[in-house]
Every structure is written in structure tokens, then in C-alpha cells.
């Protein structure tokens, strides 16, 4: 009887739900670190490493850099060690970071709103040619990324950047990253409002603020007042999207909690209207919620999207208003569905009578020589302003009408076309195995090759292709190239080669899209087809087959994304 009682007690005890482990939320669990990443951030701010770089590491060299600085705090100043050449993708997950890395750095130049003056463009081009072996990639975060940077040269690079108003401050790390902004801010004839003052206000007040320099993970911002909603607002931690309120005039619709990577989630509308005057304070409130309530125990759950998933938009808005703002925000309207693309490729009129020209560098790859030549071309044709875009494009502003044709012709000679093919226009690729320690496959050259092959393979149906069809290529599962949001997204993997070995390949995502005129203004994540993996060498053949099936079976007006979402799996393999 006693034994039975003990068994029952044990059974009852085992049936009790296990106590949840704390998430290391500062406002709930305290600031005691629960992993090494949190330890080194509390021991010394990432912002403080700059002094050691300037006074010690630049003089003593790579071997003098401490581990927590090299693999942690350097990120706060836009620096990551790059991948050592010759390490194949099959070894990415098997080797320690120290075995994967080279003695050179990727440096990310922060371009809030993607804005560059002619002087700034020439400075970046000069740095590229002198210190980065000519490299200069335009990222889908509107930054420019350099490679082959040596620590000995970092102080001089900073000096040159800062002399023209640029920086690498908080370009990486657990901080507020670059602020995406509409490339047409202040120039578009159909702009709802110019977000530049809001972006500038946030940057000047809060970027580099020690109080915001230890977040659970990165914090991404997007702000646009353009009706094309051109800053991929659904996949940022906070987004402010331009709207017209029937009572309060122009302002922003507030979105929070988006992010992709291996656990993709789209941002949620809080239903709140934010005036331009309120916007910096609202941004400050949201980032402090992330700092104070964000999950820190497990790094793979430390993005704001996980807090949003647990709280929901109603609670998030209540906490924002009650604990951080001290006032209620007005309810506001949803953004109106876009009527045209937000990549801004081509020639378009500005509100002042001049023109902007959206140029396509293939998968964002340019170099210092090209940027210098572009600067010369801009100056010759009366332009002194350049914008980068979240689609790896370049937008040149202020071209007089009489100079447009000449500018477009000469830009094309630089490999920067204003009239790209369907596949040139909407293909993006991340850095890939060439430089990235996380990558499994090559991306930039693969994407370029696939584009060329598709233009030949589908030449006979060119007039039946949609105006745009996005093909995004990523070298690993982390989705820097936004694969879940593409018509066709390719996630790098090592796959069986059919002969008992392995080869580089991709898992396929189909039918994704963010708010745009081709996708019914509905952000959706792409679907995966069970077991569908394509070798790198076979990508063009697979995409050709897929597009021909779409052309043959689509209904009138049906987008590729909608067709791919609704198609039977047999049609997609």
C-alpha cells in the first residue's frame, strides 16, 4: 500500500508541467547573464573597442586582438572576420570559427536611408581601391560592404569616412542596425511624406548611445513615406510606413516584430498612427522594450519577433503606451496597396522636373573603379546625389531631362543598366561562400550565371514573362537575401549528388512576396516542396521548367507567386 502511494505520488509529480526556464529578460529576470555572449557585453560595451583598435590593435596587428573583441565587440564597428579561401561548404558546420576565418575583415559602411553625396561616393570608391582590393558590394540593407580589410588600416578608413559624414558605427552587432529609408525620400512626386527628418533624428539622437548598445540581438528599422512601400517593412523589427490619416494628416503606420532567418515571421500592425513628431520617441520606446523585455537566454530566440509572437500586437502596444510613452497613440489606417514596384529601376520624373534613374548592378556587385566612374558620370550629367536601395540597386538623382539619354547610355557601358531584363532586374544574392563564414554554397557567381542562362533558355517566351519575377539566392539558412519572400527563393545546402557523394545545391522556396503591386499587397512567406532540392549546376534548367509551366497553366492575370502557392506539388518539381 505504501509502495502504491509512493508510485502514485511519483506519477503525480511527473505529470506536473515543468517550470519554464527564465528567458533572461532584464525587466523580469534581472541582468545576470545566462550565456557568454551576454557576459562579454556586460563586461565591456562593444562601443569601447574602437579605442583599442585605434591605440593597440592597429599597431600590434591581428594576433594581438583578444577573442571577445575579435568575435564579439568588433561587430559594433561594422567588422567581421571573413572566410578563409579554400574551405568548401561541406566543412562550414564542422569547423570552429577560428578555423574558418581569415586575417582579413568585412567592413560594413552604414548608409542610413541609402544616401550618398558625390564626395561620399568618391571616398568610398577610394577606400575600396586602396584598402579593399577593389571590392564594394551593395547589400539589400542599403549598406556598402568592403572585403580584405586589415586591422592596421581601420583607423585611416574611419578617418576618411568620418571626414565626409559616413561611419561604420553599429553597422553590425546587438544594436540598432542601419535605418532603411525610401531611396526617393524628398524627391518623388507621389511621396506621402519625406521621412528624412525622422531618420536623421533617430540617427543623431540614438545611434551610438551606450544605453542602447546592449540589445538581445540586432534591431532592424525601416521608414518610408513612399506609396510603393519600398523598404520591405514586413520583415523589420520596427517599420514606419507612410499613410494619410483622415483627421491627423500625414504620418506613419506602425509595424513591429518582423524577421526572417531560420524561423521567419512577418511584422504585425499595431493599428497605431504615429505623427512625424512622435516617430523618434515611438522608435525609442520600441527599442527599449526590446532591450528590457527581449529574450536573452537562447540566442536563436533573441529577436524581437519572438516576443511579439508571445505578446501579440495588442499587448505590445499597451506596454509601449503605458510604460514607455506615457500617452496613447491614435488609431490609424492601413497603408494603401502599392500600384507599382518599389525597386525604382528605370527613368522616372522627380517632383522638381528633373529625373531619377534606377540602375541595376548585377546582384549588387560593383567595385571601386565602377563607383569612381559612376561618380564622374554623375558629375558630368549634373547629379551630385546617389541612393542605394533594399533591392541591391543604385538610384541616381537630379538628372536634367536633356541629359537623361546620355547618362543612361554611358551608365550601361559601366554594367549599370536602367533597362535590365526580367531576370537581371529582380535577382538578388547574398555574399555567399566567397567571404562569409556561415555560407555553404557560392551565390554571386551562381546567380549571375543562372541569369545569363535563363535569358537564353527563355528567349522564345520573352514577351510572355511577367514584368518582374524575383529570384533570390542565399548561401545558408539565415536568409540575408530574403529567400522566403521571393517568387523563387534558393537556400544553400549540401545535397546528395546521386552518385554516392555530395554537391552544392539549394532548397527551393516558392511563392513568397512582400507588399507590392504584384502580390495583392499581401506579405506572404514562400512554400517549400517536400524533398525538392536542386543542384547548383541545375538551377537554370529547373527555373526554366517552372516558368514554362507557369506560362502554360496560369489563369488570366495570375501572378507567379499566386500560381506557385496554389499549384500541386507535382507541378513544382
Image (cartoon, rainbow, N blue to C red):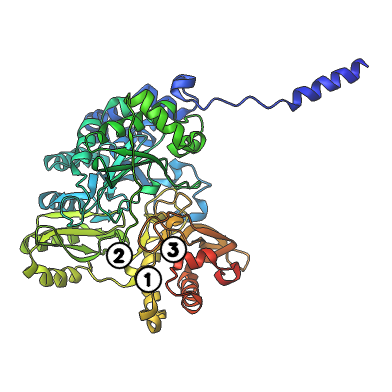
CB under 8 Å between callouts 2 and 1? yes
Left or right: 223 as drawn, with respect to 11: left
Callout 2: few (<14), some (14-19), or many (20+) C-alpha neighbours within 10 Å?
many
Point out the frontmost of discs 3 and 1: 3
**Where is residue 223 shown, x and y percent of the image?**
28, 45
CB under 8 Å between callouts 3 and 1? no
557, 330: nearer the viewer: 330
Q: Earlier in the sequence, mark 2 or mark 3?
A: 2
Q: Which mark is residue 487?
A: 3
In this view, which residue lies farthest toward the right?
1
In percent of the image, x 39 and y 84: which residue is there? 460
121, 296: nearer the viewer: 296
Asked which secondary structure carries label 3, the reply is: loop
Residue indicated by mark 1:
451
Residue indicated by mark 2:
362
Left or right: 174 as drawn, with respect to 245: right
Q: Earlier in the sequence, mark 2 or mark 1?
A: 2
Q: Which mark is residue 171?
A: none
Amino acid at each position: 500500500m505504501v509502495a502504491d502511494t509512493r508510485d502514485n505520488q511519483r506519477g503525480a509529480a511527473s505529470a506536473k508541467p515543468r517550470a519554464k526556464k527564465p528567458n533572461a529578460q532584464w525587466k523580469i529576470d534581472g541582468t545576470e547573464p545566462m550565456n557568454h555572449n551576454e557576459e562579454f557585453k556586460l563586461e565591456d560595451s562593444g562601443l569601447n573597442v574602437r579605442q583599442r583598435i585605434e591605440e593597440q590593435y592597429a599597431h600590434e596587428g591581428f594576433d594581438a586582438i583578444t577573442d571577445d573583441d575579435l568575435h564579439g565587440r568588433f561587430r559594433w564597428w561594422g567588422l567581421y572576420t571573413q572566410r578563409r579561401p579554400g574551405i568548401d561548404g561541406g566543412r562550414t558546420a564542422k569547423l570552429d570559427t577560428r578555423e574558418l576565418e581569415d586575417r582579413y575583415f568585412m567592413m560594413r559602411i552604414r548608409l542610413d536611408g541609402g544616401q550618398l553625396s558625390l564626395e561620399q561616393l568618391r571616398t568610398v570608391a577610394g577606400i575600396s581601391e586602396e584598402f579593399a582590393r577593389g571590392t564594394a558590394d551593395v547589400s539589400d540593407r542599403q549598406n556598402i560592404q568592403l572585403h580584405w580589410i586589415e586591422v592596421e588600416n581601420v583607423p585611416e578608413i574611419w578617418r576618411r569616412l568620418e571626414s565626409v559624414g559616413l561611419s561604420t558605427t553599429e553597422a553590425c552587432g546587438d544594436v540598432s542596425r542601419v535605418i532603411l529609408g525610401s531611396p526617393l525620400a524628398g524627391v518623388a512626386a507621389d511621396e506621402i511624406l519625406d521621412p528624412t527628418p525622422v531618420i536623421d533624428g533617430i540617427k543623431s539622437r540614438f545611434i551610438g548611445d551606450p544605453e542602447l548598445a546592449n540589445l538581445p540581438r540586432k534591431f532592424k528599422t525601416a521608414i518610408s513615406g513612399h506609396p510603393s512601400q519600398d523598404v520591405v517593412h514586413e520583415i523589420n523589427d520596427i517599420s514606419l510606413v507612410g499613410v494619410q490619416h483622415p483627421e491627423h494628416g500625414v504620418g506613419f503606420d506602425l509595424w513591429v516584430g518582423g524577421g526572417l532567418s531560420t524561423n521567419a515571421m512577418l511584422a504585425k500592425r499595431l493599428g497605431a498612427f504615429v505623427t512625424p513628431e512622435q516617430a523618434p520617441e515611438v522608435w525609442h520606446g520600441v527599442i527599449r522594450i526590446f532591450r528590457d523585455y527581449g529574450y536573452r537566454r537562447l540566442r536563436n530566440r533573441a529577436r524581437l519577433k519572438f516576443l511579439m509572437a508571445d505578446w501579440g500586437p495588442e499587448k505590445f502596444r499597451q506596454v509601449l503606451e503605458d510604460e514607455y510613452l506615457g500617452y496613447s497613440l491614435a488609431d490609424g489606417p492601413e497603408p494603401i496597396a502599392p500600384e507599382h514596384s518599389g525597386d525604382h529601376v528605370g527613368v522616372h520624373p522627380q517632383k522638381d522636373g528633373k529625373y531619377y534613374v534606377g540602375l541595376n548592378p548585377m546582384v549588387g556587385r560593383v567595385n571601386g573603379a565602377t563607383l569612381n566612374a559612376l561618380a564622374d558620370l554623375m558629375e558630368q550629367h549634373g547629379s551630385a546625389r546617389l541612393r542605394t536601395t533594399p533591392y541591391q540597386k543604385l538610384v541616381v538623382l537630379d538628372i536634367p531631362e536633356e541629359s537623361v539619354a546620355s547618362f543612361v547610355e554611358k551608365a550601361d557601358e559601366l554594367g549599370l543598366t536602367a533597362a535590365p531584363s526580367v531576370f537581371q532586374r529582380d535577382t538578388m544574392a547574398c555574399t555567399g561562400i566567397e567571404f562569409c563564414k556561415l555560407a555553404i554554397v557560392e551565390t554571386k557567381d551562381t546567380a549571375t550565371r543562372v541569369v545569363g542562362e535563363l535569358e537564353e533558355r527563355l528567349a522564345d517566351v520573352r514577351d510572355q514573362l511577367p514584368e518582374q519575377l524575383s529570384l533570390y539566392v542565399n548561401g545558408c539558412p539565415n536568409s540575408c537575401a530574403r529567400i522566403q519572400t521571393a517568387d523563387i527563393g534558393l537556400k544553400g545546402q549540401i545535397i546528395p549528388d546521386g552518385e554516392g557523394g555530395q554537391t552544392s545545391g539549394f532548397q527551393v522556396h516558392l511563392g513568397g512576396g512582400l507588399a507590392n503591386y504584384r502580390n495583392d499587397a499581401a506579405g506572404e512567406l514562400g512554400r517549400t516542396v517536400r524533398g525538392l532540392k536542386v543542384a547548383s549546376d541545375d538551377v537554370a534548367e529547373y527555373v526554366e521548367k517552372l516558368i514554362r509551366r507557369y506560362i502554360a497553366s496560369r489563369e488570366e492575370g495570375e501572378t507567379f507567386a499566386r500560381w506557385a502557392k496554389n499549384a500541386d506539388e507535382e507541378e513544382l518539381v
